[in-house]
Amino acid sequence: MKYLFAVMLLAGMTGNVFSQKKTKLDVEKELAYCVAQTRKTLAEKHPFNQLPRRIIKADTSWNYVGIDDWTSGFWPGMLWYAYEYSGDETFRQAASSYTSALLPVLDQKEHDHDLGFMFYLSAGNGLRLTKDPVYKQTLLRASDSLALLYNPEVGTILSWPRMIKKMGWPHNTIMDNMINLEMLFWAAKNGGGKQLYQMAEKHAETTMKYHFRADGTSYHVAVYDDKSGRFIKGVTHQGYADNSMWARGQAWAIYGFTMSATETGREDFLRTAQKAADVYIKRLPGDHIPYWDFDDPKIPNAPKDASAAAIVASGLLQLSTLVHDKVKSRNYREQAEKMLVSLASADYKSGNKNHAFLMHSTGHHPNGTEIDVSINYADYYYIEALLRLKKLQNGQKI
């Protein structure tokens, strides 16, 4: 009895035991919920060049941003996913219109490193589901534009090109940029040229070398000399401190290196994804939803970040299909399902409170913006994770 009490006490102290009752996730029910919430947002009837980004606590409807916003691809991406699940032509037509509305962004060369977020999630899903060649051309244009930000001396794509003078860094690369590589990998295989593959692979290789600490936690930003390529320092711009584990940054690392391992077959990328995932999982609180930064001294009174949980859940489902060890594979999938069970609970689901899927995400905490809000990228990765889990349950490939 004393031994059992000691184990329970230790589990409570570490926060690594899933505190909720083990509940089997009803994936169909949750996908139907996402479809219903998407209809509510469509009913707000905003112009196609205005896209929903966040909902603060006091509101039920979205705050909208323009096509230049880095999150502009998430809403059309959600519409494509809603169409994929429901088959409802209303979603297909809306997804197509919102995707087309983003095209003027491509008239601005070297506009932003987030072109993958903007276009692979919108036009990429559109191409996958409709085979419309227009989307292929859009993705190739976006990839060529993104490639203009690649610095061969450094071996990475420049982040925040419009903020170089403000930031005071000669060349910086943020962990988020790993997600944009998927579009380059795709383009290299679909008429864009092998140099795009080489850029993406080298970017991931350089990030793997300089973005991580010995324990598998990551910096948000790596700063380099733009002439020599020398690594200068690691910075955690949107986290609590330079040596802390910012939850969403670690989520991008897990998702991005899982994707890069999938695209290249490189075992070192796969090991990096696993190491990043293992330290993240080890330090999770009881409900499997992280605080915005794992090292915020205000924990447990710090805000949570449902967006990080959704990103990681989706990434872990894919990671579970790549690892060779069956025990580890099963654990990654089980961890992802636990995250989704929590996100699907009344503690995190928006329900009738607002038109989003999820509550309790954190955007830029140090800047004092988007703290404890509903946000579009949390919703995007939530529905993506649900669709991925549905495919795995049906014995299909992700």
Image (cartoon, rainbow, N blue to C red):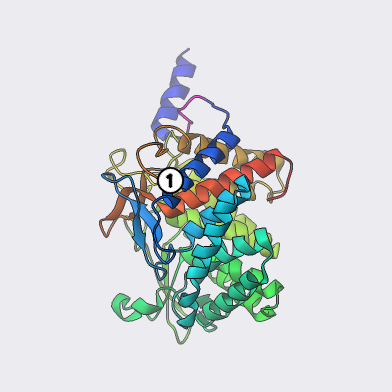
Above or below, comparing residue 262 to residue 384 in the picture = below
Q: Is residue 19 magenta?
A: yes
Q: Secondary structure at mark 1?
A: helix
Chief secondary structure of the magenta portion: loop
Q: Is residue 185 left or right of residue 212?
A: right
Q: Is residue 325 left or right of residue 382?
A: right
Q: Quadrant of residue 223?
A: bottom left
Residue farthest to the right, as pictured:
395
Q: Position of residue 213 (x, y in %)?
A: 47, 59
Q: Quadrant of residue 390?
A: top right
Given residues 271 and 144, the one toward you in this image is 144
Q: Position of residue 73 (x, y in %)?
A: 49, 63
Q: Position of residue 214 (x, y in %)?
A: 49, 57
Given residues 198 and 146, the one toward you in this image is 146
Given residues 96 and 161, the one toward you in this image is 96
Q: Is residue 84 left or right of residue 287?
A: right
Residue farthest to the top, as pictured:
1
Give the magenta-colored segment's residue range.
17-21
Q: Position of residue 275 (x, y in %)?
A: 56, 52
Q: Amino acid at mark 1?
A: Lys
Q: Is residue 372 magenta?
A: no
One can see residue 254 in this view: no
Above or below, comparing residue 83 to residue 339 in the picture = below
Q: Which residue is mark 1?
A: 40
